[in-house]
Amino acid sequence: MPAFQPEFKPVANVGENILLLPENEPFKIVEIIALPTIILDFGPLTANTKDTSVIDIVTDKLEMEKEHLAQFRMVLLDDFEIEFFQPKTVKRWTTRNLSAVLDKHLERIPDALHLTEWFQFENKSAGIIRNNPTNTDLSMTRILFFGFKFKLERLPSIPEKFTAVFTGGI
């Protein structure tokens, strides 16, 4: 299946193989579990301010069990924006000279939710930097995560057929 499809389906099915990149770790999917709604509140954010460091969204939050992978999409529930990092030291959603952000404006673009899709393997790091570009203090900065959780079985070698999944590295 091509990456970033508007219709949200598991990246692969039970019995199919995936290859986690950039580690080149092969797995077979043995179970898929829906994750309908996870809402995390990252706390208040003063008007016209931006975080000075990356907030860990994995540890004690979206961390998966050993040999488990999640396929997430995100929706901002409050009027702020985020920059996404995966791992926490590498900013994603960038061009050579610009950084894209996720904000409430994405709702105005038909079928654009697929642009927020990312994969979380075990406890590999990911993070966000929040920005409040408004003149209003925010008491909450909530993000809704939803998707699928895959129970995996490690394979001894890379199979002939697989779906490649980028997990952001170590």
Image (spheres, grey):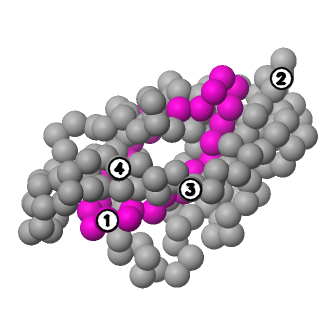
The reply, left or right, for residue 69 in relation to residue 99 is right
142 lies above or below 119: below
Name the residue that disc number 4 marks.
41
Which residue is at the far top? Answer: 156
**Mark in the foreground, 2 or 3:** 3
| Quadrant placement of the N terminus | bottom right
Q: Is residue 100 visible?
A: no
Say what secondary structure mark 3 lies in.
strand
Q: What residue is shown at x 51% (from left), y 63% (from top)?
A: 115
> Residue farthest to the front?
139
Please name whichever residue, 104 or 139, is drawn nearer the observer in this view of the structure. Answer: 139
Q: Which residues are magenta?
A: 63-87
- The quarter holding residue 131 reads bottom left
Residue 159: x and y, percent? 87, 31
Name which of mark 3 and mark 1 comes first in the sequence: 3
Disc 1 designates what residue?
A: 78
Kind of residue at disc 1: Asp
**Contact, mark 3 vs mark 1 (Cβ under 8 Å):** no
Q: Which residue is mark 3?
A: 37
Residue at image mark 2: 155
Label 2 SS: loop
State the CA–CA distance, disc 2 to disc 4.
37 Å
